[in-house]
Image (spheres, grey):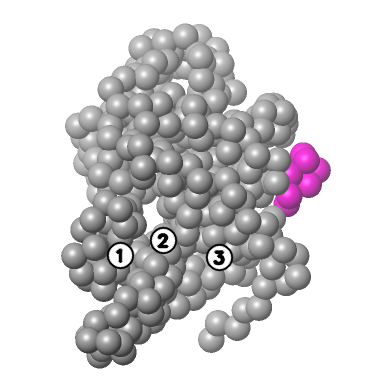
Amino acid sequence: MIAFEPTEEQQLLQRTARDFAANEIRPLVERVRRDGPPEQPWHLVKPIVARGAELGFTRLFVPEEFGGMGGSCVDAVLLLEELGAADVGMASDYFALTSVMPLMMLRAGSDEQKKRFLDAFMANPAMVLAGAQSEPNVAGSELMVGGPNPDAGPKLSARRDGEGWLLNGRKSAFVTNAGAASSYMIIARTAPDQPAFKGLSIFHVPAGTPGLSIGPKTRLIGWPLSVHAELILDDVRLPSDALVGPENGAAMVFAQIPEMPICLAACFVGLARASYDYALAYARERKSVGVPIIQHQAVALKIADMAVDLHTARLAVWDAARACETDPMAAGMFKAPAAKTIAVDAAIRNAERCVQVLGGYGVAKEYEAGRFLNDAWVGWSCDFTRDVLRLGITQMLP
């Protein structure tokens, strides 16, 4: 049974996030809907991220001793639902990803690495972070391959070079925040003769490192304010302490960060809520045969289904978030991927129903239903596809 009531502090965080979304994110979303997708989204988003950082949104998981909020995953999902309701792309890429990435260093880095990384992170309020997993000819899902085949998985190589490391290869054009990020957590092959789950390591690579460059960009069907591009590493030399966690230990490090899919799931709960709120308001105002269309059973049933899906997704995300504190193993192995699957499904279904409730206006650009649907479908593939997450769940079943 899930019994959860936000504390006064958490309710204040929700209100602060809701006001921020209304006053900072929504005006930019409206501008993009009116003028079209910008060529350089980061220039428009950067000041908003900086103002969010000043409120602690990207520093949520940073311990208080380093100047952060020292928040929990429950705090994060309450915050991110509010931001996701305004724009799921901005919430996911700039706020969720950037707030969670420091956990990788906090849980796997040395004391010296933590201090150096967090000092830089806290000094720059507009800093966003990125992770680089998939490659042009290697699906991100191959990171979850548990079989013995050493040919599966990422090929970007990291080999010892004197006292440091030499990295060569490319990451696919889906690297989130590529070109905007101040630093990257890059997965590389350190043991090419081993299967992926035994031969991958994580390296911290600051932007501007010689040999690191940005390749072709990818435009998504939604998320017009996000940036995704290829990452190219050509003889990138790193010091020995660029390695985060143990050599060949990427799988172990990732297993310690269930907050990532849970926080992304919270953003999609926000999108599911936005579709529901929009459809409900329209159904109460729009009239057909003299009465609001919500009084017609066909519409009323769709609205009811939207409410149920939203409630279900929110509870799944809350449950997973609480498990990060009470049962991290269950959170990482089952509840986190389950929450993301449920939340993305709810976002897609609610966006589809929103289009249907609006009828002809559902496919008009002057209305938001089409934006909700495009944004929702991006969630099918981000941070592993929905099908890959489900297959991972089956591997954990007793």
Amino acid under disc 1: Ala
Q: 71 or 250, which is in the foreground? A: 71
- Contact between labelled residues 2 and 3, with CB atoms less than 8 Å apart: no
Query: Label 1 belongs to which residue?
Result: 351
**How far from the left and from the top, in percent, is residue 351?**
30, 65
Q: Label 1 to label 3, Cα distance in Å?
A: 24 Å
Residue 334 visible somewhere in the drawing: no
Query: Label 2 belongs to which residue?
Result: 271
Q: Residues within 10 Å of mark 3 (few under 14, many from 20)?
A: many
Amino acid under disc 2: Leu
Secondary structure type for disc 2: helix
Residue interval drawn in magenta: 63-70
Secondary structure type for disc 1: helix
- Contact between labelled residues 3 and 1, with CB atoms less than 8 Å apart: no
**How far from the left and from the top, in percent, is residue 283?**
34, 77
Q: Image quarter for residue 76?
A: bottom right
Quarter of the image containing the C terminus? bottom left
Relative to residue 241, is residue 71 drawn left or right?
right
Q: Is residue 26 magenta?
A: no
